[in-house]
Structures are given as C-alpha cells and as structure tokens.
Image (cartoon, helix red, strand yellow):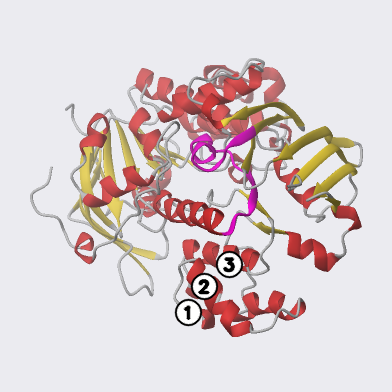
C-alpha cells in the first residue's frame, strides 16, 4: 500500500518571512498524525499547503503517491477534505444543511443525492430532519458535525483537521472526538490533525510532530507523552507544561 | 473565613427582550480567596462577572443582596461605580489583543491608568508603571514600556493587562478566561504570576473559566453553573468527589494525557438540572 500522505522538503514564504523553512514527514495508512506547537509555528500553514489553499510553496506533497500539484481540482477534492476550527465561520449562513451537503455531490456527479445525504447525516449522528435547518438553528457541536459530514460526503482518503474541537465546550468536544474516532475506524481514512491540546492529541493520534518556528523539532509516538521521552528542549518544555497544567500542583 | 469582600444572594439577570433570565438565583460569598466559576458557554458565568462590575447596560439585574465591602452594588450610582471600577474592583479579559489600545504604547496605557485613579505627576506615573511591569516579571520593563501592543506576544500582553488591573491595589479581581487565548507553555507562567500577586496582596479573585483543570489548580473553591443556575459549590480539592451529575459529566468528558482510548463519556443533560437543587453543599 502506498503512503497516503508524504511531505518532502516543503517550504513556504510569505514575502520576506519564511513560515516553513523545510518540512518533511510521512503519514502511515489509517493513521492519525498530530501537529502541535505554539501559535505561529506553522501548523495550520502545513494543512493549507497540503490542501492547495496556499499554492506558493516549494517541495513535494503526495497523496497515495500522486503529487497534489498534478491533481485536478476535482481529483484533489475527492482525495482530501478539511474541517476547520470554527464551526460558526465555516458554514455558509444562508445555505441550509441540505444545500451545503448536496453541492459537492452534484458537482462531482455522484448521483442519488438523497440517499447519500441521509447516509452521511446518520454517520455523523444527526437526525435526517436537520437537513432543512440553517446553521443558526444548530448548536456549535451540531455545526461541527455538519462540517464533518460535508468533508466526508466525497469519501476522501485524507481528512485534514484544524483544531476541530478548540472552539467547543469539553462536553461537546467529547462527542466530536468520539465521532471522529468511530468514523475513522469505520471508513479507514487517514487524518492530519492540528491541535494545541496534548490530551486531545493523546486521545486521537498515533504519532505527532512538535513544531517551533516552522520547523519540526521532533516526531514522537503517543506513548512518549506521559513519560516525557522527548529529547528536543522545546518539545520537552511543551510536554512538561501540558502535564503540569493537567495535574494538580 | 475572613470577613467577606463580596456577598451575593439570589442574583437574577435578564437581558432585555430575552424570554428566560440568563442567570437565576445565584448566591455566593467571596473572602480573600480564589473562587472559580465554571460552566459551558451560555451557562451565564461571564454574565455574573459583568453584573458584578455593572457592565450590563441592557440587562435587568435583581438580587436580594449584592454587597461589595460597604457598597451596595444594586443601588450604587453610576458615579460611585466609576470610582470602584479599576480602583477597588477590576477585570482581566480573555484576549489582550482586544483589550489594549492598539495605537498607544503599552507603558503609556498603564501610566494612564495610574493617573486616572490617583493624583500624581506624569513622572511618578511612569515609575509606577515600570515597577508594575517588573512585578509581573517582565525582564526589561523599559523596553516593553515603549512597545506597541502588536509588538508584544500574547503572554506578554496578558501580563501587561494584569499589571494594569492590579495597579490600584483592588480588593476584587474578576478574571474572565484570562489564559484561553494563550499557548499552553505561556499559560502556566501567566497564571503563576497572577496567582502570586493575588496571594501576596490578599486580593479576592473570581476566575471565570470553562477549563476544569485550570480551576482545580488555581482556585480554592469552585461554583459550577449550568443554564444560568449554580448547580454545585465545592472546594477545588474536592472536585473529583463532585456529587452533581453535571459536574461529574464535565469531568469525565475531558480527555486526559495517558488516559484510556475508549469512547469518552458523553454528558446526558437532564431537564431537572435547571431547577434549584435542594440540600447540597
């Protein structure tokens, strides 16, 4: 089986500022790979480069052995999809759930729209009657479920998650994390997730990269968090701070 | 407990035009201690904080009693409130990016706060501001004094806010999600500085947060709010022994480092939680 996602020597500059000097990593099939680091360290920029929402980068990004640059827009959209941080900002306020979900099906001429819509709503745990609601009639957690449904309706092999739960309350976060874990087991897609919360990374991811100033300081397995097996000073500091924050002092 | 700084009894807040009150029947007292208010978004925790400062012009605030030291916050005139705000009670908000004036130097804003509360020369105000920046552990106060808000990091900005809010020696500080906009690595530092100053000066602190870990570590007592009501009050150290199903549900829903990967327990909301609880401590 080919590597679902490979990033080689990715570099990205915004004018004079180099955001990503040189990033390389690979994600294994079915894996959930985490990106952690302080704000401004370039985590989300990697997702934007992979999804071609930013195109001025250099290097090579390949999905299943195919370079994303060589893919047509249609092919790219079927290979990868993204879920954003803020469910209040990522859904069109004047589009009903039905409109938001049926548009990709129509564009890609997949057929039996209604059956697909019903299926995907059931998958994300929303009643089918919610198809005729508008985003303002949904809670934050329900909106994030719709955003996940919209990402999954084209059955992508890669799902990019940009802080999918940080705008939500813990109770709702638990629901969304459970949902993502269940869908990943059922559909077998590969995830690349940005998060600043190591507890969430520990729950979701198999491996994660610690980033600072656009560089990957270290790639660690999930099991390295609790014993703090990191060797790079920044990675150690981040893990220490997260553990200290979580435990009573 | 020492003489309370703040006593609130049966506080009810209703926004104009809203069918339901945002906060209903909340009662608590605050001594020289750190009180956490936790709850989900929309539970009314920030509304309580703002009501104490009387920063809710579009809401009706009713209470059996709302006493801050010798001042009755229910009947105080706007003029009396202006003398209190920033002076005897102050508020630290979530994101320093939005609470500092972007077109004025950080230090000048602190010095301006000095001048607003006390009669002093500009020179003396500047010295006070520099001393305050040092108190929040900024290594080079002079450098930071001359910077604009966009030139400082989030953690630094929040320390500047803390410096400004603690300047007049308030008796009560209300911190509304003071660190949720900060990275984990800076979060602890900022909290420790706030905590140190609050203890040292014997200030009463109300920490409003959705983060149970934070409240557990930095508060003495915790109020848990659900749908505008206080459902449970307990010592922070006793949080794990919480009795209310809502509190227990919130605690269980939190993923933990090194925790199990089984599906996280999901909160099941019950309508009876919105009714007053009888006989729980």
Q: Position of residue A132 (x, y in %)?
A: 53, 83
Residue that protrudes farthest toward the left in the picture: B279
Q: Are marks 1 and 3 on the same chain?
A: yes
* CA gap, disc 1 and disc 3: 12 Å
| Disc with the residue nearer the chain's start (3 vs 2) | 2
Range of magenta residues: A187-208
| Disc with the residue nearer the chain's start (1 vs 3) | 1
Q: Chain of mark 3?
A: A
Residue B142 versus residue A50: which sits nearer the camera?
A50
Q: Which residue is mark 1?
A: A128
How many other residues sit within 10 Å of disc 1, few (<14), some (14-19) or many (≥20)? some
Residue B190 seen in the current view? no
Q: Position of residue A87 (x, y in %)?
A: 57, 61
CB atoms of marks 3 and 2 within 8 Å: yes
Q: Which residue is mark 3?
A: A149
Q: Are marks 3 and 2 on the same chain?
A: yes
């Amino acid at each position: 089986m080919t590597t679902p996602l490979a990033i080689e020597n990715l570099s990205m500059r915004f004018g004079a500022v180099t955001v990503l000097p040189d990033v390389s990593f690979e994600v294994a099939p079915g894996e959930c790979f985490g990106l952690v680091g302080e704000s401004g360290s370039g985590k989300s920029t990697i997702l934007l480069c992979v999804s071609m929402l930013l195109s001025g980068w250099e290097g090579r990004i390949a999905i299943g052995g195919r370079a994303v640059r060589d893919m047509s827009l249609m092919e790219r959209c079927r290979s990868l999809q993204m879920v954003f941080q803020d469910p209040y900002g990522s859904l069109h306020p004047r589009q009903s759930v039905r409109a938001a979900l049926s548009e990709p099906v129509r564009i890609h001429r997949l057929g039996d729209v209604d059956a697909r819509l019903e299926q995907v709503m059931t998958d994300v745990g929303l009643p089918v009657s919610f198809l005729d609601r508008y985003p303002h009639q949904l809670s934050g957690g329900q909106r994030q479920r719709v955003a996940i449904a919209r990402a999954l309706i084209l059955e992508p092999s890669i799902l990019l998650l940009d802080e999918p739960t940080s705008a939500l309350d813990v109770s709702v976060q638990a629901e969304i994390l459970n949902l993502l874990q269940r869908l990943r087991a059922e559909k077998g897609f590969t995830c690349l997730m940005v998060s600043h919360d190591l507890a969430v990374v520990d729950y979701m991811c198999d491996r994660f990269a610690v980033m600072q100033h656009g560089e990957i300081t270290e790639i660690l397995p999930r099991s390295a968090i609790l014993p703090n097996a990191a060797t790079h000073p920044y990675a150690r500091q981040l893990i220490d701070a997260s553990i200290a924050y979580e435990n009573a002092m | 407990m020492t003489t309370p700084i703040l006593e609130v009894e049966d506080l009810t807040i209703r926004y104009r035009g809203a069918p339901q009150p945002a906060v209903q029947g909340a009662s608590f007292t605050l001594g020289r201690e750190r009180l956490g208010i936790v709850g989900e978004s929309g539970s009314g925790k920030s509304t309580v904080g703002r009501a104490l400062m009387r920063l809710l012009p579009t809401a009706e605030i009713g209470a059996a009693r709302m006493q801050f030291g010798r001042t009755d916050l229910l009947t105080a005139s706007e003029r009396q409130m202006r003398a209190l705000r920033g002076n005897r009670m102050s508020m630290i908000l979530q994101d320093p990016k939005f609470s500092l004036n972007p077109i004025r130097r950080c230090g000048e804003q602190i010095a301006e706060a000095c001048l607003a509360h006390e009669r002093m020369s500009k020179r003396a105000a500047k010295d006070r501001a520099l001393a305050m920046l040092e108190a929040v552990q900024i290594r080079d106060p002079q450098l930071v004094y001359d910077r604009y808000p966009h030139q400082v990091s989030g953690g630094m900005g929040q320390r500047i806010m803390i410096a400004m809010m603690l300047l007049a020696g308030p008796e009560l500080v209300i911190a509304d999600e003071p660190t949720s906009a900060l990275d984990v690595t800076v979060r602890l530092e900022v909290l420790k500085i706030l905590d140190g100053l609050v203890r040292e000066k014997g200030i009463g602190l109300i920490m409003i947060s959705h983060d149970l870990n934070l409240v557990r570590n930095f508060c003495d007592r915790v109020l848990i709010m659900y749908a505008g009501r206080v459902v449970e009050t307990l010592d922070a150290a006793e949080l794990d022994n919480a009795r209310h199903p809502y509190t227990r549900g919130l605690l269980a829903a939190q993923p933990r480092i090194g925790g199990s990967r089984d599906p996280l327990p999901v909160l099941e909301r019950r309508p009876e939680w919105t009714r007053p609880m009888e006989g729980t401590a």
